[in-house]
Amino acid sequence: MNGALTDEALTGLPGVTDWQLVRGGGQDTLLVAGPPAAARPSSAPGRDDDHTADRAADAGDAAVRGTDPAALPALMRQLDETALLTMARTLDRTRLFRDGGRHGTDRILEALAVAPRHAWIVRRWLRTLTAENRLHLHAATGRYHSLAAPDRREHARALRELDGACRGLGYPPSMTRFFRAAAERLPLLLQDRASLQEVLFPDGETGTARGNYRDSVPSRWANHAAASLIAEEARHRTSRGPLRVLEAGAGVGGTTGTVLEALGDTDVDYLFTDVSPFFLRTAKEVFGGRPGLRHALFDIQADPLAQGFEAGSQDVVLAANVLHNARHAGRALAALRELLVPGGLLVLVESCQEHYQTLTSMYLLMSPAPGEQDWFTDLRVGQDRVFLTAEEWTHQLDAAGFDPLPVLPHEEHPLAGAAGQRVVAGRVGADAARPDTGRVRTALADRLPPASHLPRVHAVDRIIRPTLPTGAPC
Ligand SMILES: C[S@@+](CC[C@H](N)C(=O)[O-])C[C@H]1O[C@@H](n2cnc3c(N)ncnc32)[C@H](O)[C@@H]1O
């Protein structure tokens, strides 16, 4: 942390009327905004992005034809109900709530011996079980009581019956096994005495995760819609040379395969990136021979330019189920915008709604790293949550300088509410009055003591300030 970055040093920088200092992530970052523009001129004159979004929605629908969308909410609810039983059963095994016991959060965390980094998950369980009337909170004392928990048999039956719901949702059988294995190991996982990575990627095998991110009905819909947006981009571009796509957090390639298929024989320079070398190795095995496919390490938290990427070098940036990992969404979006050409397209696939199943499985992968000081420093600060709503993403894109496209599936689509996987896209908006980051850096270098580390500087259209929680998270 750079102590020289005081309010005094940061006030009155050239062209800057508002700013936000984002601490953490290895390097302080300064987000700078200019005077508010009356209205942004169109970033892509002649493009009908509403029509493009409609075509993408059609592609999503076509990809899940044969499944009954009306049946999905009940199947998702069955997964949620099973997760509620799992949370209740795990709490019940502490015996704290037997014989009328009443306990505060700290005592519950202690009885479960939860690793500090996973404490947020248990706090979320307590709120969820209370909201679902399976646990009660005595507001005056902050103590929980009267847990309604299943016995071992009831819980085992619910876990067995997961299979039908998972099949209906298009998950491979290995995903059902994963949900069950995570439920059975929860106490150990919460204590960091077992790792969810080992359950999800047994012996380094990636089929289970690929089934989740590629084959499930919500993923299939979202991936095909995202792929359609990118293929349309290829069809409509006027510049020469290959379509340059950078995929961030590409992981097991659940979305990559669908996008490459939709691009067909389009001339493409597709940069498959992830923060983990493990995924680059497996991608080489899976997509090895695809012409135009390259691989690179890329951390969405760190400055892309410092990682060797060039400003304005990409036509499309795709990030499927990764951007919620950014500790500050505004900083990550501003950095991704700088990678794109003017009018370039950002496509996100994001979980915009919490499913309880996540609370007993995938959330264990989203906790802060051991010893990580600042977790989320954006609008999620102090809220024990990872996902942003579709409305929050749209707001974030707009503030970071994108013209948002309609979020898909549209609100009234059965998959929008039931599954929560949404495609959030935006086009780099015309530069209304963003400060020149070069001038800002030069001014900062003049003001700070000679040996100071300069912060990263990103220009945005608007600063979004977190509203501090009032005690009732999201
Ligand atoms: C939920 S998974 C990815 C889903 C991916 N689309 C797929 O099909 O596998 C999240 C991915 O984001 C990557 N990731 C996590 N933090 C990251 C970061 N800071 N920068 C880049 N990638 C990151 C993980 O390594 C993982 O591959």
Image (tube, grey):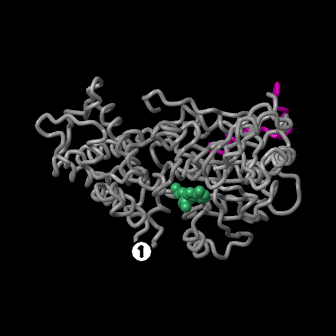
| Res. 50 in view | no
| 21 in the magenta segment | no
x, y (%) of residue 367?
45, 52
Q: Residue at x 77, y 63 (%)?
A: 266
Residue placed furthest toward the left: 99
x, y (%) of residue 438?
85, 48
x, y (%) of residue 350?
56, 46
Using the image as rendered, state which of residue 448 and residue 171 is in the foreground. Answer: 448
Q: Residue at x 26, y 42 (%)?
A: 107
How many dots with numbers? Answer: 1
| 46 in the magenta segment | yes
Q: Residues within 10 Å of mark 1 (few under 14, many from 20)?
A: few
Q: Which residues are magenta?
A: 37-58
Q: Is residue 422 above or below residue 264?
A: above
User: Helix or strand or loop: what does disc 1 sit on?
Assistant: helix
Q: What residue sits right under mark 1 in the picture?
A: 203
Using the image as rendered, state which of residue 8 and residue 466 is in the foreground. Answer: 8
Q: Residue at x 53, y 38 (%)?
A: 380
Side of 287 relative to 268 (left or right): left
